[in-house]
Image (spheres, rainbow, N blue to C red):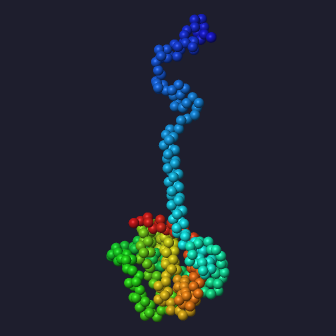
Amino acid sequence: MTNANPGLEPTAADDPSSSVAAGPLVAAGAAIPGTAGRPPGLPASGHPASGRPVPPHSVSDRRRRVLRRLGQTVRWVLLTGFALAFMYPFAWLLAASLKPRGEVFDNRLIPLTPTPQNYADVWNQLPLLSWVFNSVFIALAAATIVTLTSSAIAFGFAYFRFPGKKVLFSVLLGTMMLPGAVTLIPNYLIWKTLGWLGTTVPLWGGTLFGSAFYIFLMRQFYLSLPRDLFEAARIDGCSFFGLFRRIAFPLALPSAIIVFIFEFQASWNNFAGPLIYLNFGDPKGYTVPLGIAYAMTMYSPTAGGHGDYQYVMVASLLVTLPMMVIFAFGQRYFMEGIAAGSLKG
């Protein structure tokens, strides 16, 4: 070995094999701090000599993964079960519409002898298009009017400050507790006095004054808007109607769409109103619910029919399609409106 100090004898420090070169602790056999109790071959890094890391808490991590997957599986099974339970009536209706007369009320979802001719027979025997047109006209008129009027009234309660506002709003909410049957006779007498019985006006004219529930829903959204926004617009010269038309209503559009969908569905499914006010002798003047009731009576054996209830199933299935289309296109706005209406309590 080459000496680091020329002219001197080599020392133990110059010899790598000497215990003195490793330090007095090694020479004395003392343990280096941090190495006590370590298995042979395991360096200070905590990894074995092979370089493969030891995952900490591997058993608990594996248990958490198993529990998480189990929870996801249970949640998926429950959601699938609920979805199938809600879809079963529609599936049964679809199957019954394709069955012949003798198989309508059996328990099979798959018809033994599918009969698509049922749809052609119903189309030729019942004025479905007239029923759908009447219902769409009434539902569109009622939904559009009540959306605009309820939104305007709700904005007034949310923005304006006047004496007795809280009392008036409490009275308005109190009307939500009144059953519809309580106001049925007074409304009938009002429309009779006005001479509008036998027309569609009573079915949508009452929405000119808004609805307590829709006013409450829209007011909750308007309260979530900053008041400074409207004050700044007022300083710029915007009128009160301009505040509603240019600022408030466009921002409340998701909630307004919810009101529109709710009212459209309520008008579409309304049976008592058309039964009372539409005194048409011609079935073509019926709405969808009245038309379905008329079809059930026409095909009933007690009314001289042959019990062709598969035709009733066909008519029921066809008249549900418009509502399915509306909900399919308005689903995104439906969720946004529900979330927006719950921001302010």
Q: Is residue 191 left or right of residue 1?
A: left
Picture coordinates of residue 114, whole percent (x, y): 65, 76
Q: Is residue 139 above or below residue 31?
A: below
- Quadrant location, the C terminus: bottom left
Q: Is residue 210 left or right of residue 292?
A: left
The residue that appears at 49% across and 26% down in the rendered structure is: 38
Front residue of 34 and 231: 34
The residue that appears at 39% across and 88% down in the rendered structure is: 186
Q: Is residue 163 visible?
A: no
- Quadrant location, the N terminus: top right
Picture coordinates of residue 150, whole percent (x, y): 45, 77
Picture coordinates of residue 287, whole percent (x, y): 54, 85
Picture coordinates of residue 141, whole percent (x, y): 52, 82
Q: Is residue 108 left or right of residue 228?
A: right
Q: Is residue 77 above or below residue 291?
A: above
Q: Is residue 3 above or below residue 40?
A: above
Front residue of 288 and 2: 288
Tally of numbered discs: 0
Tell me where residue 103 sits by quadrant: bottom right
Tell me where residue 189 sits by quadrant: bottom left
The residue that appears at 57% across and 8% down in the rendered structure is: 10
Front residue of 14 and 238: 14
The residue that appears at 58% across and 34% down in the rendered structure is: 52
Q: Is residue 42 visible?
A: yes
